[in-house]
Amino acid sequence: MPYAFIRRHGTPKTEGYYILHEGYLGVFGDQGLKEDSYKNLEEKKEIRFKATNGWLGFTDKYWAATLLPDTKANLNAAYSANAAANPKSYQTDYLLDAQTIAPGASGAADFRLFAGAKEVQTIDAYDKALGLNRFELMIDWGWFYFITKPMFKAIDFFYHLVGNFGLAILIVTILVKLLFFPLASKSYASMAKMKAVQPEMAAIRERYGDDKMKQQQALMELYKKEKINPLAGCLPIVVQIPVFFSLYKVLFVTIEMRHAPFYGWIKDLSAPDPTNLFNLFGLIPIDPTTLPMFGHFLHLGVWPIIMGITMFAQMKLNPAPPDPTQKLIFDWMPLIFTFMLAGFSAGLVIYWAWNNTLSVAQQSYIMRKNGAKVELIDNIKALFVKKKSAET
């Protein structure tokens, strides 16, 4: 009975991220993808599978070792762990049907093993050449697989044209903006209309004073009459969320992005911007991120700051929400996102900054086209004038 196994001695070190699976991995015929953790197998001891057209093994962030039996073979496979051993051991194995060999005859069993880096081109080539069952899933493309893998393919295509993954991300961002252009145009046109009726909105708020219910009813009637969507400003951001998450996955899980440089101080697009405002970008020989309790919040590089500025500019293009609470949220959002994204991959922050810049240009064009004045500079000046007035 042909038998094969992979065994790991000692508990492997894992990244521990929710969006990344590390551990047992396999596809078993119609049962599909089966993932499990080292900790879970220590408790369960063993999980068995019976299937045809399957493969199984272990996966790390960038590396994997998997058994690839004949796609027509009937597998009696298992994930198992021996937590009592010293060191602990973890195993994936399979047993095939027994072979009957006549006297004087011979038999053969073929075994295939993949062990190495999870390069997309290599994985896809094995998948196609050997007719494997979704071997591409060895790379954790995530829930948005239908966006994430095409995103990587597009970035990789342009990388081979321009020779820089950072430039490839910028090009793909432009293509994404073009793809969502019709949707964004409707959104920005609605915002332009809202800007045009600002005097009427101010009159409604003045007319009804503290009567919030009547004020909201009058505003909703105005929106309906002018065909305005008050949430239009959020739409361009909302539609970008799946794209944003997919790019995050690409930067995080693909070995091709590991140590991929951009320009200047960005030597690794998959790592955070190494510069830091809180040590004056290296002029002070300290690492603020090592400080207890608050260190995690003291990482703010050049590209996150650029991203925050571009997001602030985009927000200031939009008319102020009538609700004071909403206005406060929108005013603070750029600063909050700046600190939130500071620890993310530099490639992701560069994408977001470039996307914001394109959005400002696109929105300005559409506003002019709809007869609305672009008051970006005026809105920024007004912010500081109000602050100065409040101080005096």
Image (cartoon, rainbow, N blue to C red):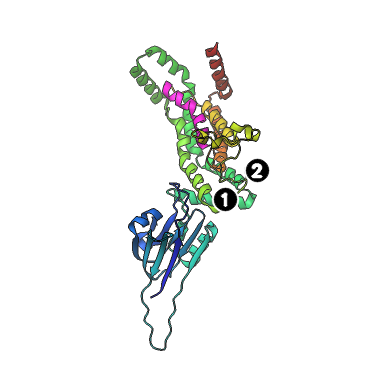
Residue 122: image x %, image y %?
A: 54, 61
Decide which of 29, 254 is in the foreground and name it: 254
Residue 390 visible in this rendered orientation of the protein: yes
Q: Residue at x 45, y 31 (%)?
A: 232
Residue 247: image x %, image y %?
A: 51, 45
Name above or below for residue 4 compared with residue 340. below
Nearer the viewer's eye, disc 1 or disc 2?
Answer: 1
Q: Amino acid at mark 2?
A: Tyr
Q: On the rendered structure, is 380 left or right of 226?
A: right
Secondary structure of residue under mark 1: loop
**Residues at marks 1 and 2 touching, judged by CB atoms closer than 8 Å:** no
Residue at far bottom of view: 104
Residues rendered magenta in the picture: 322-341
Name above or below for residue 5 compared with residue 244. below
Instruction: State the mark number for residue 263.
Output: 2
**Residue 391 lies in the magenta stretch:** no
Residue 382: image x %, image y %?
A: 55, 18
**Residue 324 lies in the magenta stretch:** yes
Q: Amino acid at mark 1?
A: Arg
- How crowded pointer 1 is (Cα within 10 Å; few <14, some 14-19, many 20+) is rated as some
Q: Residue at x 44, y 50 (%)?
A: 142
Instruction: State the mark number for residue 258.
Output: 1
